[in-house]
């Protein structure tokens, strides 16, 4: 493989402003390229020299993960406590806290790094391709493999993969709002612009990250990665990510803990000072209480849950771009989806040509349909790359094999767009007069023709009633025309209808039943005719709440559409803007809305939804806008993803409820005892060790079983519910702590070391075993079995908690041996405690306050940086990435 010299590398760094002002021949010469593109060897050499076309790296970075562990406020608090202990000469306490600190960091690092590795693996499985000319052959390559000098072909809906100097264009309009903020599309043309033009005036270039709104083009890559304009912006954003609803819930929960910790710690510190306890001892104890009341391993539990869920989803071919999106997936209760490929097989086949013009044969009508395609006639016979499904089905039909591209000359073309919903060509056969041919949605094409005879309308209705997809073809003479505009699409004569079939999926009904069982209402948004959509739904047994067409939607006010959208099941012949409008209104009604789409016209709705879902075979712009990518377009797979998201949330809430109630109860007990007793009820190091042991056992919660009823409806963060739970079960825990205090003081006349050992063991046993009651609303073990991992971890922690005060380490930890009768009393107390908790649980969940659903999720507004971050996802590689914007950057899941 030839290696590039420094001079050659420098030559490739052609600024886009210079390329825009040069003629295309000069640009190609400067880049060392030609009409046939680069050779495979040249492309490989340039990729090795310049690096991938990426602005992010999704490689897991162990050092960065380790650094984040030490950025935790809880660990900073631990370090301060350890440092103070060492400074005051309490080496034993300092060593204990140091060991706890290392264990916390180790556990957090291990779980978060595993989650990042899972994220890296998933990211690498989502591919983004570009059509490129190399060695004179058209092929698809990964977007990150593009290099300066590559000649690329781009069509409607494509996301521009690099900064590109245009070579040819056809009615090209680009949405450059992500760079310029301008909402109107920019017209493009290959003609050079004056030297020194501003970025927004470079009409001869298209930029990385922007979207082709109409038309198509070919161009030569000028700049890639961080050297492109979008790359500079993306690199400048750093790693800041927009927060999901789950993360916002965690934030609100952390604020609740902060309030409780500050209040309790302040009271303890003031009380100890009033009792004339040593200042430093009071401060250390207060800090230990503050640390002890917080679930230290909550980040590790969340990371473990998400990593476990991610691996489970990956097995089911569900890929999440960002781990926390799993929570949003489980939160969904309304799914709006396209019909094609979800309810139907997605394998569109051409079945018949129905001419309506006298003297026009079936083959003649098919030939008109082939002419009105955007693909090059000669190439389309051999490859369907880049074609829409209907055109691909036409070219794949047996009759298309007899089409002779040499007979026809295409003079001009108006590409398909979602407003006109048709494609129009100006063609000439064997040098004869020009003819205009239009192909598109029947309603739109018929509007350009004369009155429709009743027999023709009956033929069309018959096909729609049968569930067929129909494309209308119309034509007229166009002698003397050399190019065409949309104004020329008039005075047409209907030639006939092309009939396509997309059969319902065999498992679609079962998948819809699964989603219904999960409390998810499914709505269909399609560009198809209403009758076709209704026919498919009827065949699948979907109970329709009504149908709204695009024309009807256009007439409705926001309030009227919001009311109608909640009840309607089918939205037919809807435009991209109408889909997005429907999604926005459904979200405002309080539902968490998922949207599943794979076409160019789905991007707006995907961005508007709470959770955007696409498929690996989707168009660039749809896959880019999605949060979740399905390797198989299957609603059954999606249902499994929803269940996994809900299972993760349920297990996370188990840990939260356990941690807050037990920790609050223990720390309240410690606070009270510190005021009443003449000595500290537990040393700071012992409090932290107790908390670490307990939390470590709860790391098995992410793999725990979840009761079926917890999966039937989405769950939400409810801080009021958590607060009520904490203030009920925390004091119950304290009652048994006080009973232990009385037992140690009055029955065993315990000295401080014995007292601390007794409470340490009782605390570990009660707060660990209580997980079996709190993890379910059912009767534990009898009607809800925990996982084997949770049983083993919990019993292991209890055993270790009993062993430590009896081990050779007891003296170092500040414990004294305990009498045997204590353990008999402990068994009795644990039994009573579990029975009492079970009764309190039954009472708590029977109250009306616990039946009130969580507050509806508010509509989240997404800033422009959110879209830039999401789009940067496609330009990511599992290697270090550099760019002019500076330094190495790590990828995030947009």
Image (cartoon, helix red, strand yellow):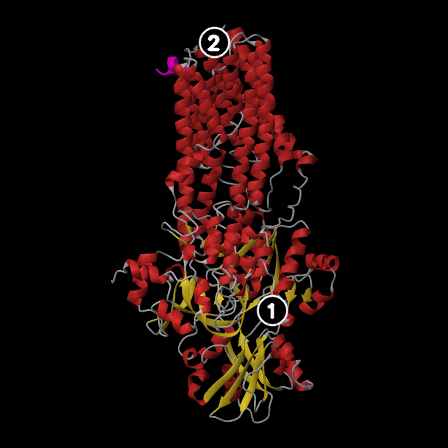
Tell me whether circle 1 and circle 2 mark residues in contact (CB < 8 Å).
no
**Gap in angstroms between the C-alphas marked 1 and 2:** 77 Å
Query: Is 270 left or right of 54, judged from the image as shown?
Result: right
Whether residue 890 is visible: yes
As drawn, 446 above or below 891: below
The spot of residue 615 in percent (x, y) is: 49, 60
Whether residue 627 is visible: no
Q: Secondary structure at mark 1?
A: loop
Q: Earlier in the sequence, mark 1 or mark 2?
A: 1
- The picture quadrant where one finds residue 88 is top left
Quadrant into which the N terminus falls = bottom left
Query: Where residue 788 is drawn, which disc sits there?
Result: none
Q: Quick one: 92 or 395, which is closer to the camera?
A: 92
Residue at 57% over, 91% down: 479
Q: Quick one: 239 or 784, which is closer to the camera?
A: 239
Residue at 65% over, 41% down: 854
Q: Quick one: 249 or 55, which is closer to the camera?
A: 55
The spot of residue 221 in percent (x, y) is: 41, 65
Crowding at dot 1, Cα within 10 Å, few <14 / some 14-19 / many 20+, comes out as many
Q: Which residue is mark 2?
A: 752
The spot of residue 270 in percent (x, y) is: 59, 14
Q: Quick one: 684 or 157, which is closer to the camera?
A: 157
As drawn, 229 above or below 367: above
* Magenta-drawn segment: 807-813
As drawn, 187 above or below 328: below
Query: Where residue 527 is drawn, which disc sits there?
Result: 1
The spot of residue 123 in percent (x, y) is: 42, 52
Residue at 31% over, 57% down: 49
Say if the magenta span includes residue 646. no
């Amino acid at each position: 493989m030839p290696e590039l010299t420094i001079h050659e590398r420098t030559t490739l760094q052609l600024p886009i402003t210079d390329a825009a002002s040069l003629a295309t021949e000069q640009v190609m010469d400067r880049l060392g390229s030609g009409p046939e593109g680069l050779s495979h060897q040249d492309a490989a050499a340039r990729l090795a020299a310049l690096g991938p076309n990426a602005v992010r790296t999704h490689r897991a970075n162990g050092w960065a993960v380790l650094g984040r562990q030490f950025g935790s406020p809880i660990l900073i608090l631990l370090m301060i406590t350890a440092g103070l202990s060492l400074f005051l000469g309490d080496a034993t306490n300092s060593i204990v806290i140091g060991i706890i600190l290392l264990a916390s960091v180790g556990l957090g690092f291990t779980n978060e790094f595993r989650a990042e590795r899972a994220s890296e693996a998933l990211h690498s499985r989502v591919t983004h391709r570009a059509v490129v000319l190399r060695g004179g052959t058209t092929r698809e390559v990964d977007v990150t493999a593009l290099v300066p000098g590559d000649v690329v072909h781009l069509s409607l809906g494509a996301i521009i993969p690099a900064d590109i100097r245009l070579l040819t264009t056809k009615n090209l309009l680009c949405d450059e709002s992500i760079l310029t903020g301008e909402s109107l599309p920019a017209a493009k043309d290959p003609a050079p612009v004056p030297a020194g033009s501003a970025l927004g005036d470079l009409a001869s270039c298209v930029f990385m990250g922007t979207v082709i709104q109409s038309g198509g083009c070919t161009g030569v890559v000028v700049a890639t990665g961080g050297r492109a304009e979008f790359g500079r912006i993306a690199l400048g954003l750093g790693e800041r990510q927009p927060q999901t609803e789950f993360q916002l819930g965690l934030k609100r929960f952390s604020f609740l803990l902060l309030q409780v910790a500050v209040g309790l710690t302040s009271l303890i510190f003031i009380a100890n000072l009033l009792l004339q306890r040593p200042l430093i001892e009071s401060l250390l104890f207060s800090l230990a209480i503050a640390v002890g009341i917080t679930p230290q391993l909550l980040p590790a539990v969340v990371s473990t849950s998400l990593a476990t869920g991610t691996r489970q989803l990956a097995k089911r071919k569900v890929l999440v771009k960002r781990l926390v999106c799993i929570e949003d997936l489980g939160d969904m209760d309304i799914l709006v989806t396209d019909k094609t490929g979800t309810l139907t097989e997605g394998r569109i086949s051409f079945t018949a040509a129905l001419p309506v013009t006298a003297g026009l044969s079936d083959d003649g009508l098919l030939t008109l349909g082939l002419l009105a395609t955007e693909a090059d006639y000669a190439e389309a016979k051999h490859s369907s790359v880049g074609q829409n499904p209907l055109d691909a089905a036409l070219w794949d039909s047996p009759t298309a094999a007899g089409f002779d591209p040499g007979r026809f000359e295409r003079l001009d073309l108006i590409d398909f767009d979602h407003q006109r919903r048709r494609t129009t060509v100006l063609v000439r056969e064997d040098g004869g007069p020009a003819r205009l041919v239009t192909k598109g949605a029947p309603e739109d094409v018929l509007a350009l023709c004369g009155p429709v005879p009743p027999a023709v309308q009956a033929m069309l209705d018959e096909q729609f009633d049968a569930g067929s997809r129909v494309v209308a073809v119309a034509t007229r003479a166009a002698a003397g025309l050399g190019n065409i505009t949309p104004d020329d699409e008039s005075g047409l004569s209907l030639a006939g209808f092309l009939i396509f079939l997309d059969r319902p999926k065999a498992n679609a009904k079962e998948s819809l039943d699964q989603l219904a069982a999960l409390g998810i209402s499914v709505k269909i948004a399609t560009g198809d005719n209403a009758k076709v959509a209704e026919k498919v739904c009827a065949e699948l047994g979907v109970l329709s709440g009504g149908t709204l067409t695009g024309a009807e939607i256009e007439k409705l006010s926001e309030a009227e559409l919001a009311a109608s959208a909640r009840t309607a099941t089918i939205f037919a012949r809807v435009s991209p803007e109408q889909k997005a409008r429907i999604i926005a209104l459904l979200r405002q009604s309080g539902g968490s809305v998922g949207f599943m789409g794979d076409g160019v016209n789905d991007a707006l709705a995907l961005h508007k939804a709470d959770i955007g879902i696409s498929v690996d075979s989707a168009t660039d712009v749809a896959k880019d806008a999605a949060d979740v990518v399905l390797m198989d377009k299957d609603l059954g797979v999606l249902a499994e993803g929803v269940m996994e998201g809900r299972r993760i949330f349920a297990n996370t809430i188990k840990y939260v409820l356990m941690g807050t109630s037990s920790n609050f109860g223990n720390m309240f007990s410690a606070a009270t005892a510190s005021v009443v007793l003449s000595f500290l009820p537990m040393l700071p190091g012992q409090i932290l060790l107790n908390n670490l042991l307990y939390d470590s056992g709860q790391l098995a919660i992410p793999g725990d079983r979840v009761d079926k009823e917890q999966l039937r409806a989405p769950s939400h963060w409810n801080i009021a519910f958590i607060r009520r739970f904490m203030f009920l079960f925390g004091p119950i825990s304290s009652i048994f702590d006080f009973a232990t205090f009385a037992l140690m003081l009055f029955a065993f006349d315990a000295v401080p070391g014995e007292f601390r050992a007794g409470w340490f063991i009782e605390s570990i046993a009660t707060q660990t075993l209580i997980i079996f009651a709190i993890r379910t609303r059912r009767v534990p073990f009898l009607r809800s079995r925990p996982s084997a991992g949770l049983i083993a971890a919990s019993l292991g922690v209890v055993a270790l908690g009993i062993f430590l005060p009896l081990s050779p380490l007891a003296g170092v930890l500040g414990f004294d041996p305990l009498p045997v009768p204590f353990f008999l009393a402990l068994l009795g107390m644990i039994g009573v405690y579990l029975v009492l908790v079970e009764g309190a649980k039954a009472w708590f969940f029977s109250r009306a306050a616990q039946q009130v659903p969580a507050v509806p999720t508010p509509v989240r507004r997404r800033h422009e940086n959110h879209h830039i971050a999401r789009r940067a996802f496609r330009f990511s590689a599992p290697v270090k990435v550099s760019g002019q914007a500076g330094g190495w950057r790590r990828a995030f899941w947009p």
